[in-house]
Amino acid sequence: MVEDTPPEGPSVHGWRKSSYSGPEGGSCLEILDNHPSGVPVRDSKVPDGPVLVFSVAGWASFTAALQQ
């Protein structure tokens, strides 16, 4: 599911960058943990831009595939 605005609610302040992101900026993803809709993902350079929301199972599958 793609949303036009970031998820709303108190957890909207919990965005975190990928542990592989460096301090210099660049191409970074941010995710929002413990959101009831699933796992929202956004581009850290465009925090007010679109958000892609993965199911928890879909996100787990995606991250597991990256680790192989």
Image: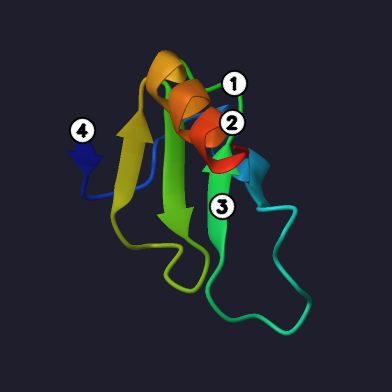
Mark 4 or mark 3: whose residue is earlier in sequence: 4
- Look at the numbered disc 4 and give the secondary structure of its residue: loop
| Horizontal and vertical percent position of residue 42 | 43, 53
Residue hosting label 2: 11
Task: Give whichever of 63, 27 is nearer the camera.
Answer: 63
Q: Residue at x 51, y 23 (%)?
A: 60
Q: Residue at x 45, y 33 (%)?
A: 62
In the picture shown, does residue 34 fall above or below 29? above
Mark 3 or mark 2: whose residue is earlier in sequence: 2
In the picture shown, does residue 63 fall above or below 36? below
Mark 2 or mark 1: whose residue is earlier in sequence: 2
Q: Are marks 4 and 3 in contact (CB under 8 Å)?
A: no
Q: Are marks 2 and 1 in contact (CB under 8 Å)?
A: yes
Quadrant assignment, res 8 = top left
Q: Residue at x 39, y 37 (%)?
A: 7
| Horizontal and vertical percent position of residue 1 | 21, 33
> For the residue marked with disc 1, what is the amino acid?
Asn
Drawn side of residue 51 relative to residue 41, left or right: left
Residue hosting label 4: 1
Judging from the image, the colouring scheme is rainbow
> For the residue marked with disc 3, what is the amino acid?
Glu
Q: State the separation of the CA atoms marked 2 and 1.
A: 8 Å
Which label belongs to residue 34? 1
Residue hosting label 3: 30
> For the residue marked with disc 4, what is the amino acid?
Met
Q: Are marks 3 and 2 in contact (CB under 8 Å)?
A: no
| Horizontal and vertical percent position of residue 5 | 29, 49
Mark 2 or mark 4: whose residue is earlier in sequence: 4
